[in-house]
Amino acid sequence: MPSASASSSAPAAGGGDEAGRPAGAPSTAAPQAVAPAALGTTTPAPANTESSRVGALFVGAVAAGNHSCTASVLHSSTKNLILTAAHCIVTPDGLSFAPGYHDGQAPYGSWPVTKAYTTTGWSQGGDPDEDFAILQVGQNGGRNIEDVVGGNILGLQVDFSTVVRLYGYPDTSEVPLLCTNATSRQDTYQRRIDCPSYAAGTSGGPWIDTDTAKVVGVIGGYQQGGDTDDTSYSAYFDHTIEDLYQQAVAGSA
């Protein structure tokens, strides 16, 4: 679900590839069509601890109607990382993140993006199975972003059939959406969920596992997140994003 103002990627750093998947990854069976699942119910997200970690990405000033994609705070020892879709990042220059953003307000402040990490699979070929990016953000008032709102733990090798809470900011909305539904397997390394009204701008929105509260996906991947508003996709989170995460932590210390 690409945003009109952020639909390609030119990453700042590389790492990882799609080759050599570990034995614990999904099988490499041929892709097959997935029957539509029952639609979840989409509502405005309530203001709580979890939703405060989700925010909108802005190019330029934080202002109503000026956001392009969605991101969320990622737990790390450096306390300064956020997670989004790789196709949202043309360049980190001038990009900022406002967690908990709503109605033109940034209750937890605005955090400048200082560096972007994507995989070589994405940077060299736009691999939809690696459509995720980890961004480093600078401090605000001498504090790291995770010290203010907390962060979601990265979830790896999670079964395709799980239930998640899906967040995202459509370009035309000033509040985030929330939908809870079961996910399914769309392709070898692609996860799918059926939730209505996830239009352009929701790309990068986190998929939060309801059992563990870990982030197990972001809207992106196949069709840059989906060509229709009622179905969203995510690249599967395995060792490829784990390697990228380790690179980002080392580079952000």
Image (spheres, rainbow, N blue to C red):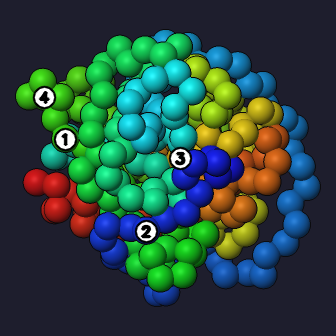
Residue 222 place in picture, x, y as percent: 69, 63
Q: Which residue is nearer to you in this view: 119 or 185?
A: 119
Residue 192 in the figure: left or right of residue 139: right
Between discs 1 and 3, the one toward the N terminus: 1
Q: Which residue is nearer to you in this view: 86 or 217?
A: 86
* Secondary structure type for disc 4: loop
Marks 2/1: CA–CA distance: 20 Å
Marks 2/3: CA–CA distance: 16 Å
Up/down of 10 relative to 83, above or below: below
Marks 4/2: CA–CA distance: 28 Å
Between discs 2 and 1, the one toward the N terminus: 2
Up/down of 232 relative to 195, above or below: below
Q: Residues within 10 Å of mark 2 (few under 14, many from 20)?
A: some
Q: Residues within 10 Å of mark 1 (few under 14, many from 20)?
A: some
**Labels 4 and 3 touching (C-beta < 8 A):** no
Residue under label 4, please give it: 143
Q: Nearer the viewer, mark 4 or mark 2?
A: 2
Regarding residue 75, the answer to whether it shows in the image is: no
Q: Amino acid at mark 3?
A: Gly
The residue depicted at 53 percent of the width and 47 percent of the height is 204
Up/down of 128 relative to 184, above or below: below
Residue under label 3, please give it: 204
Residue under label 2, please give it: 10
Residue under label 1, please give it: 138
Say which quarter of the image contains residue 68: top right
* Secondary structure type for disc 1: loop
